[in-house]
């Protein structure tokens, strides 16, 4: 019992010590955030923002598996806090409060805040500005998609779990360039309905399929493939691809699941953190992941094993980023779709 308690204390202590709390002044407000820096931090380290949901905070987004991603791939993870809205609830202003509706005050500029914070972190820790990503849960997912509308030149790709688009973004989104998008959503989500969004015009009344088609048009994808029940699970995978600049949209339809970050409990056939990072990593040319360069050799080589982004040996390799380890020491990064 003492040994078990000791191990638990060490594991918990490591998790707590791996994040540091900081403040950042922006537009007259003191904003706060948690930051995880990997031991192998270097100039090529990507930066990933992980945004909480409505009424949440940065601490809610810990223990999703991003710490393991950070250590195994040399990634900087930032968990920022939103501000309180006119109802006194913490949120991200994903163009929810634009000042256009009488009686509802204009909200803070979270788009500029996240860009400014990104620049600050890159400058302070001397990391790459080429690979900046944002993902979030619920309202944090709304915010990440909103960044693809307004800050597409800054964010390499974005991801959303249980989040869609505000009506303002849906009507006025006009990005300067297209942004790859990964979106995961449960079909029985009672908070952000799969078929008609939040049900409130201000927050977004479009459902998942409408949002997916919307972004496919922006990306100018020409091909679409659907794989039902991947990994013998209840998860369907929809891939939109064939765009002029090879940017894609991936959607995971999680049948029979609600408003949650998938993979935290139970075996539902998908881990949101892993698939989001694999998607992000495929667009980051300077990534620190296990030798992301394909090594060409003249002699025949033998495949030893296949591992995922967390270093775990896998057999099923469809719809995820996989590293092929060969007997000559070379490593190839592959993403396959059946």
Image (spheres, grey):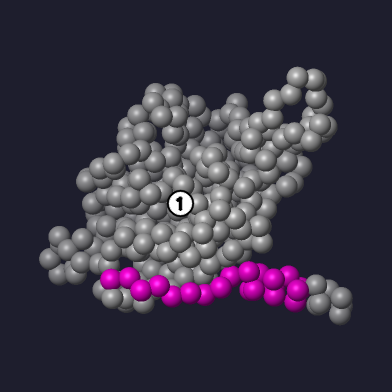
- x and y, in percent, of residue 237 in the image: 53, 36
- x and y, in percent, of residue 137 in the image: 46, 57
- x and y, in percent, of residue 143 in the image: 37, 56
The image quadrant that residue 244 belongs to is top left
Q: Is residue 253 magenta-colored? A: no
Whether residue 326 is visible to the viewer of this picture, yes or no, is: yes
Helix, strand or loop for disc 1: loop
Could you tell whether 221 is left or right of 282 in the image? left
Position of the N terminus by quadrant: bottom right
- x and y, in percent, of residue 233 in the image: 63, 40
Could you tell whether 40 is left or right of 97 in the image? right
Could you tell whether 71 is left or right of 275 in the image? right
The residue that appears at 58% across and 29% down in the rendered structure is 337
Q: Which residues are magenta?
A: 8-27
The residue that appears at 79% across and 35% down in the rendered structure is 329
Which residue was labeled with disc 1? Answer: 129
285 or 244: nearer the viewer: 285
Label 1: how many Cα within 10 Å (few below 14, some 14–19, many 20+): some
| Count of numbered labels shown in the rendering | 1
The residue that appears at 48% across and 32% down in the rendered structure is 239
Could you tell whether 53 is left or right of 289 in the image? left
Whether residue 138 is visible to the viewer of this picture, yes or no, is: no
The residue that appears at 29% across and 43% down in the rendered structure is 175
Position of the C terminus by quadrant: top right
């Amino acid at each position: 019992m003492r040994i078990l308690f000791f191990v638990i204390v060490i594991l918990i202590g490591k998790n707590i010590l791996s994040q540091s709390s900081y403040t950042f002044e922006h537009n007259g407000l003191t904003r706060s955030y948690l930051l995880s820096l990997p031991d192998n931090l270097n100039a090529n380290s990507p930066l990933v923002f992980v945004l909480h949901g409505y009424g949440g905070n940065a601490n809610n987004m810990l223990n999703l598996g991003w710490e393991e991603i950070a250590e195994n791939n040399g990634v900087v993870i930032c968990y920022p806090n939103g501000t309180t809205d006119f109802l006194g609830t913490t949120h991200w202003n994903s163009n929810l409060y634009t000042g256009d509706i009488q009686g509802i005050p204009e909200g803070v500029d979270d788009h500029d805040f996240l860009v400014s914070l990104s620049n600050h972190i890159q400058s302070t820790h001397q990391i790459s500005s080429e690979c900046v990503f944002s993902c979030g849960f619920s309202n944090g997912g709304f915010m990440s998609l909103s960044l693809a509308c307004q800050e597409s030149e800054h964010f390499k790709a974005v991801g959303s779990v249980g989040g869609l688009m505000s009506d303002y973004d849906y009507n006025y989104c006009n990005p300067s360039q297209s942004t790859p998008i990964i979106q995961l959503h449960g079909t029985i989500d009672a908070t952000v309905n799969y078929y008609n969004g939040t049900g409130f015009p201000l927050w977004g009344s479009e459902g998942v399929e409408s949002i997916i088609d919307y972004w496919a048009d922006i990306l100018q994808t020409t091909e679409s493939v659907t794989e039902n029940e991947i990994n013998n699970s209840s998860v369907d995978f929809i891939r939109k691809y064939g765009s002029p600049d090879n940017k894609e949209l991936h959607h995971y339809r999680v049948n029979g699941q609600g408003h949650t970050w998938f993979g935290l409990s139970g075996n539902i056939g998908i881990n949101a953190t892993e698939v989001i990072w694999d998607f992000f990593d495929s667009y980051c040319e300077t990534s620190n992941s296990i030798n992301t360069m394909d090594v060409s050799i003249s002699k025949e080589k033998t495949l030893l094993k296949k591992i995922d982004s967390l270093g775990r040996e896998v057999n099923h390799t469809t719809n995820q980023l996989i590293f092929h380890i060969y007997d000559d020491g070379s490593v190839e990064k592959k993403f396959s779709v059946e």
